[in-house]
Image (spheres, rainbow, N blue to C red):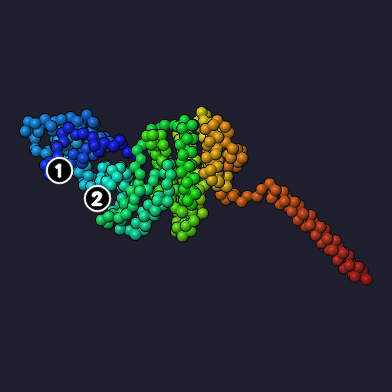
Amino acid sequence: MAAPADAENRSNPTASPPSASGTTPRDARGLSSLDESNLERSIIRRGLATPGEVEACKAHRAKLAAQGDGTPGQSLLDVMVGAKVLTKGQMARLLQERGEATRKLEIPGYTIIEKLGKGSMGVVFKARQNSVNRTVAVKILLDSLAQNKEFIRRFEREAQIAAKLSHNNIVNAIDAGEAGGRFFFVMEYVEGPTIKDFLDKNKVFEEKDAVRIAMAVAEALKHANQRALIHRDVKPENVILTKDGGVKLADLGLARLTGDETWGLSEAGMAIGTPYYISPEQVRGQTDVDIRADIYSLGATLYHMVTGKVPYGGDTPSEVMRKHVDPRVELVPPDHLNTKISSGLGMVIETMLAKNRENRYTTPDDLILDFKCLLQGDSPMIAGQKPDSLEALAEGETDEYAPTAVDEAHMIEMAGYVNSRNQIIAALAIVLGLSMVTNVLMLVAK
């Protein structure tokens, strides 16, 4: 949902003025000035041409029109192909995508501006909500999935879940519905980069910045938890940093209600999440996943932010997910990779990433408390109560019910009692055996 600055009203010196009928004239390709402006940004964003090349072609077109040497309403794309800035194939692809975008965003009450991105289930567009003249983001279910009732149900469920949430740190839902056989979901438009955008540029976050961002996400998770919801896909790509310094958690495509047993059973055994940030219980496909899974994923995201590395790497997704679960694979402490961060933050992250969820933060409230301590320069309060050794934190879920020290002492005592009893029984057996032998010998002697 992050997007370039709004430029739909940017002036275009080569665009023709509106006609007497009040409609905007179109060029030979049927493109309005708004269409052309969107194409310009798309061409530059994809690296097909530089801003200078685009402006030079526009100036050349204007010169041809002034001299009467050009075709009336000549397309900028045709000029760029003629100047060999674009190929004919690239022009055809741009026109095809423009046609698809226009067709898909014919939703009553909304006007297309530009395509923002494409996911596994839908395409997201920047649009204008005409009734209140505000910019929004519109997600449309892919045509290839719109014929499948299961995908339609999932898409509608995402919108319904989003509607349950209203928080400053969550991308909020606005509208949803179906028009012309296409299912859409309208949400708040958030302008700004994601954490992933920074990590892709090899940025390592300063401790206070990272903690502030993670605490904002924890606040979002707290809000979701209060409404019995889990996100299940917290990762750098889904955390947007707004231009005014805010933080927004996005994409509720995998979110679900914790109390929905039918839903949980339908996904039993399925590893749902993103491999680098997925919790061990999600890898195992457990049906009783709760907010602690989101805390783990936030921990993996925070680990990546302050170290520049993911907690567990691997050549394949399955190898990465195996490392999240395997108790023999130890986490490298984040403060060992980045010695600039405090041991307190390292302890917090290790607690968030405990493979045994019983050793993690129980609720986002506890995590937020420790984040506040770190921002004040104090040691964490909750994480400090956890086991000191990384080995203890890395215990797998299979050790969740391992005996305590009291249990072990009791077991040793019981074992001693059983051994003593066995020794007495063995001694009695020997005495009884000797007695029987003696009796037999006495009978034989008589």
Q: Which of the two discs, 2 and 1, labels the residue nearer the N terminus?
A: 1
Q: Nearer the viewer, residue 230 or 6?
A: 6
Name of the residue lying farthest toward the front:
132
Describe residue 71's horizontal placement relative to residue 289 as left or right. Answer: left
Q: Quadrant of residue 32?
A: top left
Can residue 122 be seen here? The reply is: no
Q: Tell me, for residue 106, which label it has, or none.
A: 2
Residue 249: where, in percent of width, then height?
A: 42, 43
Q: Quadrant of residue 425?
A: bottom right
Dividing the image into 4 quarters, which one contains the C terminus? bottom right
Mark 1 element type? loop
Residue 199: where, in percent of width, then height?
A: 41, 35
Can residue 67 be seen here? The reply is: yes
Name of the residue lying farthest toward the right:
446
Amino acid type for the residue under numbered disc 2: Glu
Q: Nearer the viewer, residue 100 or 105?
A: 105
Residue drawn 52% across and 47% down? 292
Residue occupied by mark 1 = 22
Residue drawn 14% across and 37% down? 17
Residue 124: where, in percent of width, then height?
A: 31, 46
Residue 55: where, in percent of width, then height?
A: 19, 30
Mark 2 element type? loop
